[in-house]
Amino acid sequence: MVLDPHEYIPHPSAGPTKKPHACVLVIFGASGDLTKRKLIPALYNLALENRLPERFAVVGYARSEMSDDVFREKMRDAVKEFSRTGLANESVWEQFAATLYYVRGGYEQNDGFRRLKELVEGFDRGSRVLPARGFYLATPPDAYEQLIQCIARTGLASKESDGEQRARVVIEKPFGTDLQTARELNQRIHEVLDERQIYRIDHYLGKETVQNIMVFRFANAVFEPIWNRRYVDHVQITAAESVGVENRGGYYEQAGVVRDMFQNHLLQLLCATAMEPPVGLDADSVRDEKGKLLKSVRPVAAEEVAAAAVRGQYGPSRVDGQEVPGYRQEPGVAKNSPNVTYAAIRFFIDNWRWEGVPFYLRSGKRMPKRVTEVAIQFKRPPMLLFKSHAVEDVNPNVLVMRIQPDEGVSLTFEVKPPGHDMIIRPLCLDFDYEESFGNSPPEAYETLLEDCIEGDSTLFTRHDWVELAWSLMDPIIQVWNLSRPRNFPNYEAGSWGPKEADEFMAREGRRWRKP
């Protein structure tokens, strides 16, 4: 089937006046969970807000047998179940559904790729300005290299013929399993594509609060002067999940929490929090500063891992009145698995701004609640002024940027309640996105897909960043792989992690937040 660009019905003008250029987006792995849970609902929400091009098409590609109509019906059910807006507007859905197509095929050069090429190239015909082409790899990581090679060899994208930067290839995490595999994958991709065509996605970068960190820091003169070693005692970056590995036991046995969360999400939050101001808001300027920051992070040497990092694995427990299994009882997990489901790592940044300030990163499964946040704890003020009064310790000021589930910012500071006695109590100023702006922020995939359509790679990771991140994680993973833990499982499901993590912080005169 050949696409006719003139058949497309413009989306209703209910949103912005600015529109990106025409685009055809191919989703490899279109029958999988990522497509139905995140990608298609995100695109539908963009359509609701009139943020898609008037000439737009989505081509789903997968091995499953499916017609266009069946694909559209399945995606309708997905939007109804997983979109943050539900199926809010039937008319918009009908217009959006008309842009959905499906091609059955494998991940090698075959008839499926031939049909895909015909369909995509058909969208070019009659166009004065050739539409952009997006290729989203919503597939297992072991298919990335093969798919990219096929995309290039069939002429759908190539660095030699892409002077107009039409082609964008979106690659999901994990990008490699260690530094060596990440380097090899980068080299293979660069053989057929230019770096500017590659969009390595980290959905954390699409979250509203993560984007707002830069505005918060650099647009407010009250905060930037104190964002440094003179005033900041330490920083805690937490990504806690209340669920276990569920049906991802097989994947998690290979990945573990460090590969799954630290190499990408948590280091991205570290960069956003600690980077220097870029010279501009273009993609290279922002990513240059992130790269500089990662180069300044002091690697944890093998002999320092025991003092700078804590690992854990959850065991069975009773949570909210229900028995929950331990990690080793989860489907697809070995009965004596040494795999890590919790980690806490301390890093130092060796530059002028952050010398001596510890950054504590932690993430774990089966924690008391789902929460991701960045907490900047400032130094305590001198107590000389209050020595003559029966004042307990003055609490340090804490600035918390909440990433999920309720995006916002809070600042805790000390006040004196009304009364004759000199009593000091903490007070919290809180900003919530939904309360302040009257609607929930867009999902991360909405932001990132729109940026891909527009050709803006600012919120996507660059090859050097990926390799630098792996160089920080590899030494820790290697040490833990060589020394099997003897005390696993060492924390109960529903707790804040192993006691060793609390002891680790106590030795340094600090304690973990309990968000």
Image: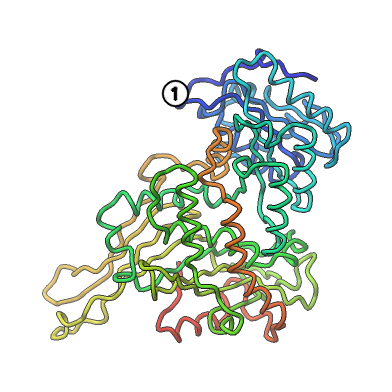
Question: Residue drawn 45% across and 84% down?
Answer: 506
Tell me if mark 1 has few (under 14), some (14-19) or many (20+) residues whose alpha carbon lies within 10 angstroms of its own: few
Give the side of residue 420 with respect to residue 353, left or right.
left
* Of 250 and 449, the residue lying toward us: 449
Q: Where's residue 93, x and y in %?
A: 62, 26
Quarter containing the N terminus = top right
Give the side of residue 259 with respect to residue 103, left or right.
left
Q: Where's residue 135, x and y in %?
A: 69, 37
Question: Residue drawn 58% across and 64% down?
Answer: 262
Q: In this view, does 444 lie above or below 428?
A: above
Q: Is residue 248 above or below residue 71?
A: below
Callout 1 amino acid: Thr
Q: Where's residue 460, x and y in %?
A: 56, 47
Q: Residue 496: in sight, yes or no?
A: no
**SS label for mark 1:** loop
Q: Kindly identify which residue carries mark 1.
A: 17
Q: Residue 152: in sight, yes or no?
A: yes
Most distant residue in the right direction: 111
Asked which quadrant contains residue 314, the reply is bottom right
Give the side of residue 247 with respect to residue 491, left or right.
right
Quarter containing the C terminus = bottom left
Q: In this view, does 47 lie above or below 248?
A: above
Question: Residue drawn 16% across and 85% down?
Answer: 387
Q: Where's residue 71, x and y in %?
A: 76, 31
Q: In this view, does 247 lie above or below 144?
A: below
